[in-house]
Image (tube, coloured by chain):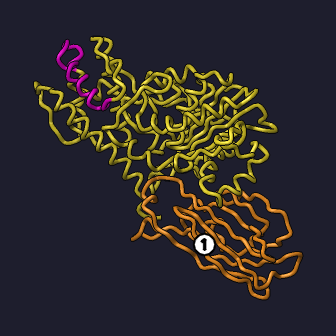
Chain colours: A yellow, B orange
């Protein structure tokens, strides 16, 4: 961890309190609380005043930009709230991916959410004078937007240090984005906090990756609960970090991924496949494993240049279908993977079945729908 | 929150407040209660001769509750004294249950309007008020 990091409690409170700028009534207490930390003089882009407090409306309130004062002098804050409108995109297998503002593939829904505010953000940053650190903070889908913001702000060279704090954030982009973003921000400046039983960080699934790509982050154990998404809420994230002495005390090594042997064994096994979070994790690992194997052995690329937008699952299907037709060394693993995925949706694939693009696409789409259903169930409040 | 209507949400709990100014009850004054979940709404009541005012609980429904999103209902209480509106209680309701404003305690407050408002963070939200919880 590097200097000028916000404390776990302070960053979690901002991630929660950013929700309280949504209307004038709720904003009053927010302003009273943060006037000792932020310059609360409201700026409007229209009058050309910058450098103070900006509430971002697009058309609903999405977050704020603020300049620190007192102990946060020479620091700026960029915070986003999660928005309901992005939930569809999160579980929609047909969503596209797009090259981010820094040139790597990211989830299209998050891209557009960030893109809608980039003019305001650019104006705000250009009005900042003498800022040495910028803190980007967000919960849930706001964490995804904060990730894109941090990545872009760092690439602009506005401040020497850009820190990212996310709570229960979904995955934002493909592996290349995760790697580049981690390298740009430096892993130690990324504070990804998530509860083990929070379902949102589990999506979108393959082949999206989390930032940072290093093997340590801030995983907090949480019980399996009813309703299952209880631990997605900021109330619990605040409770989990408020007594932490510092980031180091809640830092955890990411659970060791499934090793090559475990993945290969799982792919080759014939047992019944049930649909659980653990299966999802294994499937994730297996899919990345097979993709890597294909790329290394054949040079077939998953994402070809120039396409600005496409349906990821379709591309993945084409990729796998191509791979199934090349050397046996690779195609056998593609076969095992598709067979395993098909088993998840109750389809039996026999040895020698022709893996056409259409068939693979059907399997991918149906499995993805099951994943989405799982997350949506999680999102459905039945009783309290 | 009801089993049969999972979207039903308490947007303002039943309130009983006693208003005093420099130790004297604020009698016969109009109190305005406002809240905003999806839309700004309000109602009004008048204090009695001892400065007491009360409002019933308000419930609303929104499909937004079917998503795992944070609940935020802006809330405010103000009183008209000599034609001037004085806000004495602001909050964001972050949970759907009745009485979540004060962590499950009944919403019974007494307010000395001459005192400074302070931020209260004990109940999972940012509350700004000079009022004290009774009991």
Read off the chain for label 1: B
Is residue A61 in the magenta section? no
User: Which residue appears farthest toward the front when viewing the image?
Assistant: A47
Please provide percent x and percent y for residue A278.
37, 38
Pointer 1 residue: B42
Q: Position of residue A346 (x, y in %)?
A: 19, 42
Of all residues, the one furthest to the right in this rendering is B22
Q: Is residue A103 shown to the viewer in this render?
A: yes
**Residue A367 locus on image (x, y percent):** 27, 39
Instruction: Name the quadrant containing residue A366.
Output: top left
Task: Identify whether A225 is placed above or below B2.
Answer: above
Q: Identify the residue at image location x=80%, y=37%.
A: A71
Q: Residue at x 52, y 37 (%)?
A: A145
Residue A160's quadrant in the figure? top right
Is residue A7 in view from this perspective?
no
Depth order, front residue of A56/A107: A56
Q: Up-down: is A286 above or below A327?
A: below
The C terminus of chain B - image quarter = bottom right
* Magenta run includes residue A327: yes
The answer to whether residue B57 is left or right of residue B32 is left
The quarter holding residue B51 reads bottom right
The residue nearer to you, when weighing A217 against B26, is B26
The residue at 77%/48% (across/down) is A35
Magenta region, residue range: A310-332
Of residues A4 and A332, which is closer to you in this image? Answer: A4
Q: Main secondary structure of the magenta part?
A: helix
Q: Position of residue A212 (x, y in %)?
A: 53, 27
Residue B35, above or below A174: below
SS label for mark 1: strand
Along the line of sight, the residue nearer the viewer: A40 or A380:
A40
């Amino acid at each position: 961890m590097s200097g000028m990091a916000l404390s776990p409690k302070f960053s979690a409170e901002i991630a929660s309190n950013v929700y309280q700028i949504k209307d004038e009534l709720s904003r009053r207490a927010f302003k009273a609380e943060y006037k000792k930390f932020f310059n609360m003089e409201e700026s409007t882009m229209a009058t050309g005043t910058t450098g103070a407090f900006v509430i971002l409306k697009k058309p609903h309130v999405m977050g704020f930009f603020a300049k620190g004062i007192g102990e946060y002098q020479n620091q700026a804050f960029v915070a986003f709230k999660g928005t309901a409108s992005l939930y569809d995109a999160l579980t929609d297998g047909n969503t596209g991916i797009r090259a981010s503002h820094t040139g790597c593939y990211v989830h299209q829904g998050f891209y557009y959410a960030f893109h809608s505010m980039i003019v305001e953000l650019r104006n705000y940053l250009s009005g900042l004078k003498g800022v040495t650190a910028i803190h980007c903070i967000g919960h849930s889908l706001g964490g995804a937007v904060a990730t894109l913001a941090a990545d872009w702000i760092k690439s602009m060279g506005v401040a020497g240090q850009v820190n990212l704090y996310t709570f229960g954030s979904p995955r934002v982009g493909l592996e290349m984005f995760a790697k580049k973003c981690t390298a740009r921000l430096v892993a130690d400046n990324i504070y990804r906090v998530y509860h083990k039983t929070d379902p949102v960080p589990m999506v979108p699934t393959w082949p999206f990756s989390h930032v940072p790509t290093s093997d340590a982050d801030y995983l907090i154990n949480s019980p399996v609960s009813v309703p299952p998404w209880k631990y997605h809420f900021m109330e619990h994230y605040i409770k989990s970090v408020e007594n932490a002495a510092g980031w180091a005390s809640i830092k955890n090594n990411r659970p060791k991924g499934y090793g090559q042997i475990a993945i290969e064994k799982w792919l080759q096994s014939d047992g019944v496949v049930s649909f659980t979070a653990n299966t999802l994790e294994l499937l994730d690992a297996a899919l990345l494993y097979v993709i890597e194997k294909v790329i290394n052995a054949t040079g077939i690329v998953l994402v070809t240049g120039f396409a600005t937008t496409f349906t990821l699952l379709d591309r993945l299907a084409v990729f796998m279908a191509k791979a199934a037709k090349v050397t046996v060394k690779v195609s056998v693993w593609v076969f095992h993977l598709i067979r395993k995925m098909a088993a998840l949706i109750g389809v039996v694939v026999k040895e020698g079945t022709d893996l056409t693009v259409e068939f693979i696409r059907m399997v991918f789409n149906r499995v993805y729908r099951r994943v989405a259903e799982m997350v949506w169930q999680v999102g459905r409040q039945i009783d309290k | 929150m009801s089993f049969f209507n999972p979207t039903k949400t308490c947007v303002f709990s039943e309130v009983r407040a006693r208003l005093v100014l420099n130790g004297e009850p604020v009698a016969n004054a109009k109190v305005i209660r406002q809240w905003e979940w999806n839309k700004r709404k309000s109602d009004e009541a008048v204090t009695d001769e001892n400065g007491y005012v009360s409002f019933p609980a308000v419930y609303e429904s929104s499909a937004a509750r079917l998503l795992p999103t944070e609940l935020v209902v802006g809330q405010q209480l103000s009183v008209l004294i000599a034609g001037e509106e004085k806000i004495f209680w602001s909050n964001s309701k972050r949970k759907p249950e009745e009485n979540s404003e004060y962590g499950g305690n009944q919403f019974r407050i007494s307010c000395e309007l001459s005192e400074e408002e302070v931020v209260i963070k004990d109940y999972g939200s940012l509350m700004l008020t000079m009022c004290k919880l009774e009991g």
